[in-house]
Image (cartoon, grey):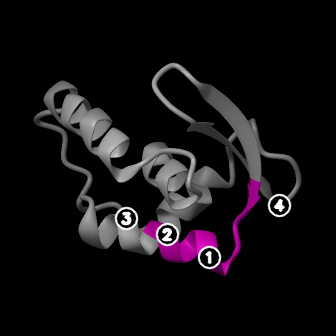
Amino acid sequence: MANFISMKLGYITQETRTEIRELGESIWAGFDINNISISEFKKALGKDKKNIGNNLGLILMKGCGEVFKEMRPMDDEFTNWIIEYFKTEI
């Protein structure tokens, strides 16, 4: 999902995201996350030690090997990205 958010923010292209996703699919074959509720997922995100206050500490990327931490609020835009990810990417 971090790569999905990186793409949404314009840090990587859809092409880069697809390449990484294809690699990830081979690694995580056999794991099913279709039954995760969005509210439980958001609750889990809110407990991450990288967070500061109400801001999520996300590890995003600008390309292969170029990762960085960015603070993002759990606002409506971010929530909509989570919903989109669970509807279209899983």
Q: Nearer the viewer, mark 3 or mark 4?
A: 3
Q: Is residue 61 magenta?
A: no
Identify which residue is drawn at 35% across, 39% down: 16
Local secondary structure at mark 1: helix
> Which residue type carries mark 4?
Asn
Q: Nearer the viewer, mark 2 or mark 4?
A: 2
Tag 1: residue type? Answer: Glu
Residue closest to the far top: 65
The span from disc 1 to disc 4 (Cα, nearest Å) is 15 Å
Q: Count neighbours of disc 1 (C-alpha within 10 A) and say few if under 14, some if 14 to 19, many if 20 or more.
A: few
Q: Are marks 3 and 2 in contact (CB under 8 Å)?
A: yes
User: Label 2 near label 1: C-beta < 8 Å?
Assistant: yes
Q: Is label 2 in a helix, a strand or a loop?
A: helix
Badge number at residue 85: 3
Helix, strand or loop status at disc 3: helix
Which residue is the site of mark 1? 77
Residue 27 sits above or below residue 1 on the image: above
Q: Could you tell whether 59 is left or right of 7 in the image?
A: right
For label 4, the residue is 54
